[in-house]
Image: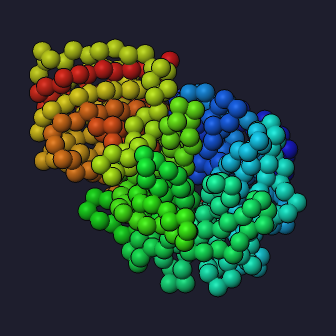
Amino acid sequence: MSTIKADQYIDKNKKNVNPEYRNEFHLMAPIGWMNDPNGFIFYKGQYHLFYQFYPYDSIWGPMHWGHAVSDDGVHWQDLPTALAPDQDYDRDGCFSGTAYVEDDILYLMYTGHVVEEGVVRQVQCLAKSEDGIHFEKLKENPVIHEEHIEGLCSIQDFRDPKLFKREGRYYSIVAANTEDKRGQLLIFESENMLDWSKGKVFLEGQKDQGIMWECPDVFELDGKDVIIMSPIQMKQQGYEYSNISSTLAMIGSIDWETLTYELETFHEIDRGLDFYAPQSALNPQGKRVITAWMQMWDRRNLTHELGHQWSGSMTLPREVKIEDNRFVQSPLSSIYDQFHYETVDLEAKEGFQSFADNPQYIHAVLNQESFKMHLAEDGDEYLLLSYQEGILTLSREKAGYAIWGNEGDDYHSRSIELESDHLALEIFIDVSSIEVFINQKMSMSMTFYKKKTERKASIQGLEHASSFKIGVFQ
Ligand code: FRU
């Protein structure tokens, strides 16, 4: 499999993709399967976003890296496939990884995945590009392999490197797990990106904190060192971590002498049903921006089942910061210029209010003990956003096709406990996704697949809205 073959296939077949559930303002692969964001970076004036990609079918397969660029985080232009599994050390997949720029050269560090007689081997590899479009895998590959992890972890679960440079030294932080199946992050050092030290344990999880930690990203934010990553089977705590594959943000500090992480606190990043493997980039305004795969492992893959020839979307990019020792997020500011707005006057009305035919953005500032919002509504089909007794719940139970998975058949909603009845909600509703931002702090992201066509919005129990604005994507 080569990138040329992939691009020829894409060009020839992308016209067959069924557009019914394709989002309008989110990144999707032109055809085929997408999962994790990879190599998210601002390079030569644009956001570059790579992603786990299998062009030939709408299910997971030997991973390629798809590639797209954007100025604003919502309009994306597809670029040629960046990596294909075409070497001995990556022939069953170019798995997730990160991007790094030095002297205008764009480097990608990714995991080479090989399965030989049922045994998995995962090693870390480099590719580089001078134009940001065509990538060449280095002849020194794999640069981190068995010898670097002797006695530390198994080569079978050793993936998703984060590459960065600090004070003249390169570091790579790679996900792994312990023998007794606890999540683990290993750290490697290098003077030249090619020769790497033996690994050291950077951080290890406890039982209940996941059997494997995937896709770590590590960066400085507002004076703290933050790790974002995706644990598998993190134990549910209250309303948190109820998806089998979760994501979390850790806040703490790195001890650069011992190369270990001192953890202060952690919490779940997004409180919806579909959000995984987030990765960050730093933009020229100095803002740290994240995006994630807006879908989930081990769930019904509806667009595949329906033969639509595509699967998977990214979330909207979000700006993140640390506030009161919490990792908080709000939509990337450049997104706002891409919508037309209208203010809705709901003051005089009472009861069940229908306020728009097909809003793609809703901004509502509410201060009341309860309400129910129906979104993407057509008769008895709708998404429900409800608030009662301090709990905000987003449910897709009545929003079209049932999307079941390993969490069970009746797992169709998620809830957040809030501290006060003051709610500033920002809601983005695309063709098959909803993202709710709460008080510029938290988010709930979810996919949904309607069977009916109307997409009205209404609110029940409205008492007082100090602001109510709707928008449509331009
Ligand atoms: C996370 C993940 C990564 C891996 C990739 C393979 O979703 O399992 O750990 O690199 O997907 O597609």
Q: Nearer the viewer, residue 340 or 312?
A: 340
Q: How many marks?
A: 0
Taking the view exactly as shown, the residue that stands out farthest to the right is 139
Q: Residue at x 46, y 47 (%)?
A: 221
- Relative side of 411 to 115, left or right: left
User: Could you say where residue 249 lies in the image, as x and y percent from the top left?
Assistant: 42, 56
Q: Is residue 206 above or below residue 26?
A: below
Give the quadrant of the N terminus: bottom right
Residue 287 makes an appearance in the image: yes
Q: State the colouring used for the structure image.
A: rainbow
Q: Residue at x 73, y 45 (%)?
A: 102
User: Could you say where residue 55 lies in the image, as x and y percent from the top left?
Assistant: 72, 47
Q: Which quarter is ligand 1 in? A: bottom right
User: Could you say where residue 261 lies in the image, as x and y percent from the top left?
Assistant: 48, 67
Q: Nearer the viewer, residue 445 or 460?
A: 445
Q: Quadrant of residue 262?
A: bottom left
Q: Residue at x 40, y 32 (%)?
A: 428
Q: Is residue 449 above or below residue 168?
A: above
- Relative side of 44 to 286, left or right: right
- Relative side of 195 to 410, left or right: right
